[in-house]
Image: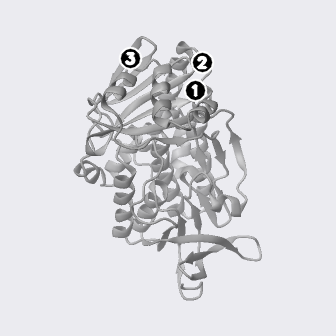
């Protein structure tokens, strides 16, 4: 493996999924020399809510990638249904900010498109390549990474090491990133793919102490999910399919009946839950993006959109090339994220009345509008983004 004297990169990005591949693509398009690494094999799946919100679709459009998502057979979503007990609220997806539909691609589709776009832009991509350690100079600045691939390990120099390696980020741990804000609550999530279900757009259903819904995705499938209390997931470990149906029933969702009639097209997947957090996002020679730096409960299905948003903000800050721009990346991310994180954390408690759940969704809608407003004008750097937020 090339050492720091033979090859040096402007950025090493650890994690080649949504946040990492998008960041690599944007930096490579700007002329940076980028090394993108991932310890997994290409084409592997990952636990995900799939759904993209308006800001995420808008960024894919800006990046010239939305056509590839559509060509892969990803169905358009033109309405969102909220069901609070017996009260139904249907929200049509109106054309705005260059977006006339939402999409929820399978991660095997989305991640492959983003990785291909990064390589097309000039990034070097290595799978089966894991981070072992970061390299620091005498002043403590990160100056590269020790990478391991096959039987070979070696140091690689870089102006910046970016952690896009998820909730258990090794980059965050190695650089000592502090948690700026920690959530309290976490739902356990169960989901499975179902074939033959009518496509009615995004469906989010809420009952006392439970949530569920359905998200149309590729191959004529829908992701049917339930949000439960962690102890409920533990109780159904022996039969996750039954737990999924039970969770939908607890949420008062008619999807429980549909699921019982159609059966599952895949084995159910369970996620035990994790409280949300905002970690310190930048430091001398390093940065975090995606779940590595910011995570919130999947009950609001906004993680992929946030990953794209922060990839765009971070790439703008890196292109600006100043410490001030990097600090403003973090402050802009925090200003956008904290209202969303707080409302999501409250929803994740599953301890609300249906009226309170609606009010929390109102707060989330306001946070989403701020996100779209920021990104729809093609903000060129984080400083402009911060200025826009201060005037909202």
Q: Answer whether residue 370 is visible to the viewer in this image.
A: no
Q: Which residue is mark 1?
A: 347
Mark 3 or mark 2: name the one nearer the start of the chain.
3
**Cβ atoms under marks 2 and 1 closer than 8 Å:** yes
Q: Which residue is mark 3?
A: 89
CA gap, disc 3 to disc 2? 18 Å
Disc 2, SS: loop
Which residue, as the protein is rendered here, is positioned at the far bottom?
6
How dense is the environment of label 1, judged by Cα within 10 Å: few (below 14), some, or many (20 and up)? many
Give the foreground label among 3 and 2.
2
Q: Answer whether residue 141 is visible to the viewer in this image.
A: yes
Picture coordinates of residue 171, whole percent (x, y): 64, 62
Name the foreground residue: 200 vs 228: 228
How dense is the environment of label 3, judged by Cα within 10 Å: few (below 14), some, or many (20 and up)? few
Horizontal side, residue 286 vs residue 218: left or right:
right
Picture coordinates of residue 172, whole percent (x, y): 66, 58
Name the foreground residue: 108 vs 11: 108
Q: Is residue 61 above or below residue 36?
A: above
| Residue at 40% from the left image edge and 48% from the top image edge | 378
Q: Is residue 123 above or below residue 387?
A: below
**Cβ atoms under marks 1 and 3 closer than 8 Å:** no
Disc 3, SS: strand
Mark 1 or mark 3: name the one nearer the start of the chain.
3
Q: How many marks are shown on the rendered structure?
A: 3
Picture coordinates of residue 368, whole percent (x, y): 47, 33
Q: Which residue is mark 2?
A: 352
Which residue, as the protein is rendered here, is positioned at the far right?
138
| Residue at 25% from the left image edge and 48% from the top image edge | 70
């Amino acid at each position: 493996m090339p050492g720091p004297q033979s090859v040096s990169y402007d950025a090493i990005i650890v994690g080649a999924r949504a946040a990492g591949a998008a960041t690599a693509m944007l930096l490579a398009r700007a002329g940076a020399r980028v090394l993108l690494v991932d310890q997994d094999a290409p084409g592997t799946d990952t636990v995900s809510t799939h759904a993209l919100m308006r800001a995420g679709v808008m960024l894919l459009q800006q990046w010239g990638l939305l056509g590839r998502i559509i060509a892969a057979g990803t169905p358009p979503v033109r309405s969102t249904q909220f069901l609070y007990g017996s009260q139904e609220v249907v929200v049509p997806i109106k054309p705005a900010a260059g977006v006339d539909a939402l999409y929820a691609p399978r991660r095997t589709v989305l991640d492959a498109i983003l990785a291909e776009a990064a390589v097309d832009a000039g990034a070097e991509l290595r799978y089966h390549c894991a981070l072992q350690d970061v390299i620091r100079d005498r002043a403590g600045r990160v100056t590269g990474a020790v990478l391991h691939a096959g039987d070979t390990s070696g140091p690689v120099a870089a102006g910046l090491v970016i952690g896009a390696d998820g909730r258990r980020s090794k980059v965050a741990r190695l650089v000592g990133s502090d948690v700026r804000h920690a959530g309290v609550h976490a739902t356990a999530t169960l989901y499975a793919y179902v074939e033959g279900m009518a496509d009615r757009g995004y469906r989010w259903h809420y009952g006392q102490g439970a949530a569920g819904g359905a998200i149309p995705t590729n191959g004529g499938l829908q992701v049917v999910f339930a949000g439960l209390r962690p102890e409920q997931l533990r109780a159904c470990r022996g039969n996750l399919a039954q737990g999924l149906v039970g969770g939908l029933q607890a949420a008062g969702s008619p999807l429980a009946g549909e699921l019982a009639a159609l059966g599952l097209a895949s084995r159910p997947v369970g996620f035990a839950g994790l409280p949300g957090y905002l970690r310190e996002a930048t430091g001398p020679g390093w940065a975090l993006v995606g779940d590595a730096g910011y995570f919130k409960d999947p009950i609001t299905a906004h993680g992929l959109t946030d990953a794209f948003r922060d990839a765009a903000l971070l790439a703008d800050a890196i292109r600006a090339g100043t410490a001030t721009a990097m600090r403003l990346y973090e402050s802009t991310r925090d200003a956008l994220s904290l209202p969303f994180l707080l409302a999501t954390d409250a929803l994740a408690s599953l301890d609300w009345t249906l009226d309170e759940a609606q009010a929390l969704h109102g707060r989330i809608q306001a946070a989403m509008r701020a996100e779209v407003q920021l990104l729809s004008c093609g903000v060129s750097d984080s400083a402009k983004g911060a200025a826009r937020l201060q005037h909202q």
